Image (spheres, rainbow, N blue to C red):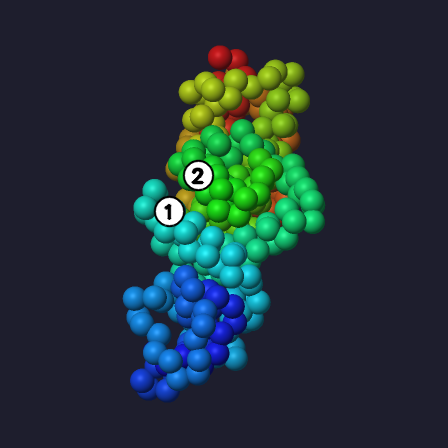
Amino acid sequence: MIFEKSYNNSAALVKDEAGVEWIVIGKGIGFGKKAGDIIEESKIERRFKNTDQDTTLKTVTSLSSLALSLTNKMVELSQIKIGIKFDNYAYTSLADHVDFMLTRNKENMILDNQMMQWEVVKLYPKEVAVARELVAMVEKEAKVTLPESEVVFLTYHLVNVGFDKETVQETMELSKLLDGILRIVSLETGKSLDRTSFNYSRFVTHLRALLIQIIKKQDRKNDGLDPVFGQLMKQKYPETSKVVEKIAYFIKEKTGYQLGEDDEVYLILHVWRVSNR
């Protein structure tokens, strides 16, 4: 690779043997270089083809050297810990977040996401554990103190990388829907749900699978439960059935999706278990 110009110590514009331009990322890759210098392949940690159509390039070339350096280390640690691989889009998204995170810290801006810590920990324990390590690493490397909310934000990025074609926005929507449903159950039953119980864990797992399909607009096949069984369940658990009706209304209002009879029967079982055992 032939060096053309530097964006900062960690990002540079280079040209390969075929004359194709690339934006390359790597520790100190742009430091002290002059046009025409050779850039060793071993120094390149990530590369982006320099095309006008690639809007991610504008983001990459505008980020600080520290943000890129930290992102490289975060990506490497995440790959080692949970085996996820960052494509260029996911890398750029994380790097942009890290850069903004450092800016917020410098300007003493506290961004409280008001998100559901318990639900995130319950749904994505591995990602949360890694996110905590990433926060600790950033605090040490950048000599900053980060709020607890950064663990949640970074968890979403890790989950996003692990979910096929799912965006961070979809992941956040999932958590908001879960939180809303759990609030409905707690308020309507008048009970505080035991978040450490097996029934709670099973309920959340069921909801997560259901909501992911709804959010991603995947075709859903009902199991074809006997309608008589559904009616019996509603007669046996009338109060729980009313709670599920409110859950169905909430999901319809937020996503436009109308739960089927089978969905409601399964939810009746889960809601009854989580609120009565």
Name the residue beneath numbered marker 1: 77
Residue type at tag 1: Leu
- Depth check, front residue: 185 or 56: 56
Residue 166, percent from left and from top:
47, 53
Q: Which residue appears at 49% of the width and 12% of the height?
A: 277
Pick the residue in front: 47 or 171. 47
In this rendering, is residue 115 above or below 23?
A: above
Left or right of 235? Residue 218 is: left
Q: Position of residue 17 (x, y in %)?
A: 31, 85
* Residue 98 position (above or below residue 52): above
Which quadrant would the N terminus be assigned to in this image? bottom left
Residue at 56 percent across and 71 percent down: it is 58
Compared with 17, 244 (above or below) is above
Taking the image as drawn, is residue 238 in sight?
A: no
Mark 2: secondary structure: helix
**With 167 as the anchor, is 198 left or right in this view?**
left
Q: Secondary structure at mark 1?
A: helix
Picture quadrant where residue 91 is located: bottom left
Q: Are marks 1 and 2 in contact (CB under 8 Å)?
A: yes
User: Dot 1 surroundings within 10 Å: few (below 14), some, or many (20 or more)?
Assistant: some
Other residues around mark 2 within 10 Å, as few (<14) / some (14–19) / many (≥20): some
Front-lying residue, 260 or 79: 79
Q: Position of residue 90 (x, y in %)?
A: 46, 57
Q: Going 47% across and 30% down the picture, which residue do you hit?
A: 122
- According to the picture, the residue beneath numbered tag 2 turns out to be 133
